[in-house]
Amino acid sequence: MKQLERDFVVLGGGPGGYTAAFRAADLGRSVTLIEQQKSLGGVCLNVGCIPSKTLLHLAQVMDDAAQLESVGITYGKPKVDLDAIRTHKETVVSNLTGGLDGLVKARKVERITGTGSFISDTELLIKTEDGEMTITFKDLVIAVGSRPIQIPGIPYEDERIWDSTKALEVSEIPKRLTIIGGGIIGMEMAAIYHGLGSEITVIEMTDSIIPPADRDLKQSLLKQVKKQYKAIYTSTKVTKVSAESESLKVELEGEKAPDSIEADAVLVAVGRKVNTDRIDIDKTTIKRGDRDWILTDEKQRTNVSHIYAIGDVTGDPMLAHRATHQGKVAAEVASGLKSAFTPMSIPSVAYTQPEIAWIGLTEQEAKEKKIPIKKGSFPWQASGRAMTELAPLGVSKALFDPESGRILGAGIAGKHAGELIGEAVLALEMGAVAEDIALTIHPHPTLSETFAVAAELAEGTATDTMNR
Ligand code: FAD
């Protein structure tokens, strides 16, 4: 068996892993990147963020076109060519993953296509198509990510039972799609398949879809989907799914839900599980916590000082932008720089129609933890740009510390909320007070103004609407 000795090794080539590899290479390390798939980019590029947003964009454009009917422009019913859509989605993905291959070469990163597992705290076993090898390493970054959780009572062997990866293959458009899980992934998939023509039912165990988001941010989305979808059953549990010849029978337990419903496909989107169980981690002394998440300090270091862990494998929130930032920190710390992962907060975005985005403290949390806040909330019905965009369903709000005046959190619901939240993230990181935001001249007419008006409302200086 080949025995290699390497300097800086990254296990897993998702957003966290390739970022760590590239940053370490730029800092002069000799880098080896091990990824089991032929294509780099991990879940995000291949079966997550990018394919889902590609398909959501198509659904959004179809929705926008249909909305024009109310102002006198009518198109025919959209004709959906699933093969062409799939090709488009695959092209977007392969353009991006191909770009990563180029960056691997340009940075002279050694790429090994194979599956890695631990032999000890200092050695990996790699299985490739051409055989096995061992690698001893000076520094290692674990970035092996996560996979969908499976819940009991579901016949996963039936091809009508989907996970998010299968749903993003867009191999068919089921007439009736039931989605178990009303979180961000479930609601994004609902928007995609509604756009493609499926009749959607969402089952959510908690009392609301997208549980961590504030209720006022969800109002616009709820208003839309209640009109568009067959049903949304909250506070409802799926107890069993049976595969019958003509359909799937989904059994439910919930006050307002029927005993069972029928579906042509069922998507299970109830969360993700880390891949630590697939890398023989028990052969190391690396400490793990609840749900097998790898424990690290703010330098992304595990208890084994030359081993780092980043991204989904370190737990919630499982988001690509968290993974990439942690990847940079791990590479920098391992290369002797003073670096740490200490964000004020990590933004969350549901790319639904309308979008919902938030950062930092939520109102829900402030209430639970009895944190005093001063709030400014601006409904988009009073925004000129929202009107011109036919996008009155929205709200921008900002929460401030009543004493220091500093921003504590923000939430935006509406068209492009995912883009607009970037300003709130910057404000939070820079320790902005309401006045900083209110006195920053935003271009008019834009949706970005709505965030400034939210700050003006907290200040009592708004003129576009009544100060309360
Ligand atoms: P991953 O992306 O999971 O990458 C891990 C890599 O390690 C994979 O390529 C895997 O093949 C490889 N690997 C695993 N085990 C081994 C092994 N033993 N040997 C070698 N290689 C191995 N996040 C957002 O921020 N925005 C979004 O809009 C968004 N949308 C999403 C939509 C969906 C449908 C899903 C499922 C996820 C979405 N996410 C989104 C989450 C995001 O994809 C993840 O948070 C992100 O990919 C995590 O990056 P990572 O590098 O930690 O791990």
Image (spheres, rainbow, N blue to C red):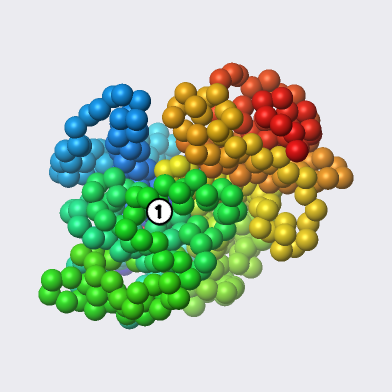
Q: Which residue is mark 1?
A: 226
Q: Amino acid at mark 1?
A: Lys
Residue 153, placed above or below residue 16: below
Within the image, what quadrant is residue 201 found in?
bottom left
Q: Residues within 10 Å of mark 1 (few under 14, many from 20)?
A: few
Position of the N terminus, as image quadrant, is bottom left
Quadrant of picture, ligand 1: bottom left
Q: Nearer the viewer, residue 350 or 132?
A: 350
Position of the C terminus, as image quadrant, is top right
Q: Is residue 39 visible?
A: no
Q: Is residue 99 left or right of residue 456?
A: left
Q: Is residue 311 visible?
A: yes
Q: Position of residue 218 (x, y in %)?
A: 52, 51
Residue at 77% of width from left, 28% of height from top? 461
Residue 25, placed above or below residue 10: above
Tell me the SS state at disc 1: helix
Q: Position of residue 177 (x, y in %)?
A: 27, 60
Residue at 35% of width from left, 25% of height from top? 71
Give the residue at the far right of this rendering. Answer: 403
Q: Is mark 1 within 8 Å of ligand 1?
A: no
Residue at 57% of width from left, 74% of height from top? 290
